Amino acid sequence: MSLPKPVFKEKAEKISVLYRNYFFMFFILLFFCSLFVFQNAIASSAGFKESITQKVGYAHLQQAANFSQAQAAFENQDYVYSARLLSPLTISGHVQAQYLLATQYDLGLGVKRNENLSFHWYKKAAEAGIGIAQHNLAVAYAQGNGVDADLTKAIAWWERAANAGNTDSQYNLGIIYAAGRDSVKPDMEKALKWWRMAAISGDPAAQFNLGAIYANGIGLSSRTCEASRWWKKSAANGFAQAEMALAVLQTKSDYASCR
């Protein structure tokens, strides 16, 4: 907003800078408030397909055929039939079936929602190395779903999944270390590490948070061009907040050097 008389030009510039500073303070407050929301355990088709590509030996050809039928039923949203086929497979130790049945109990798909059974089968699949099961098990520990809440165990499982490339786990670890929780103290270096891993893998929320760290100089000096780079990636991936943040960033005096 400019004032009509030239004599007020200096005052107007000061007011403009003051408003921008207040906006950034308000923006970063909203940023930290958003850090307390965990990623939910979701049975996405992409995550499921990733988990079933792992090579696991089948005890019998019939077992493989039954799982194939269960998988097809799940993808066709015939959850009652898929649960009926999965149940005996889980008991016999079929790890992909354990993960899939855990998902059904977790979300109440074709079965009555049961956090205890969901936790039980997620744990079995996680211990066998299914990455998305490890992530969902960590969520269960963090939120106390089917088990006493235990952030230490949640972090341990998130780290296992994150190191194997699970972006949701990388993102959640960034949240934990950015805001701190329970006995975990804020550690922006660790938050930066995990969000950077998720951002490089294309996670738009991690890209946005990484940009916020650079824009506001949280734990390091402000780096407008780095913030711009990550917010542009986030916006290109459909994260609306990144577009709003970029509009504000473009009012900063040092933004011109980023073009």
Image (tube, rainbow, N blue to C red):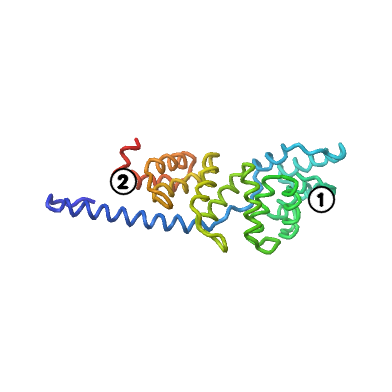
- Crowding at dot 2, Cα within 10 Å, few <14 / some 14-19 / many 20+, comes out as few
In front: label 1 or label 2: 2
In the image, 233 versus 192, the foreground residue is 192
Q: Residue at x 72, y 49 (%)?
A: 126
In the image, 259 versus 81, the foreground residue is 259
Q: Which residue is mark 1?
A: 87
- Crowding at dot 1, Cα within 10 Å, few <14 / some 14-19 / many 20+, comes out as some
Image-quadrant location for residue 144: bottom right
Residue 213: percent from left, percent from top: 44, 49
In the image, 209 versus 71, the foreground residue is 209
- Type of amino acid under label 2: Lys
Q: Residue at x 22, y 54 (%)?
A: 14
Q: Residue at x 37, y 57 (%)?
A: 25
Q: Which residue is mark 2?
A: 252
Looking at the image, residue 178 sits to the left or right of residue 42; the answer is left
In the image, residue 147 sits, relative to residue 51, either above or below, namely: below
Q: Secondary structure at mark 1?
A: helix
Quadrant containing the C terminus is: top left
- Type of amino acid under label 1: Ser
Sequence-first disc among 1 and 2:
1
Residue 61: percent from left, percent from top: 86, 36
Looking at the image, residue 180 sits to the left or right of residue 162; the answer is left
Q: Residue at x 69, y 39 (%)?
A: 49
Q: Answer whether labels 1 and 2 touch (C-beta < 8 Å).
A: no
Residue 252: percent from left, percent from top: 31, 46
**Mark 1 vs mark 2, CA separation in Å:** 59 Å
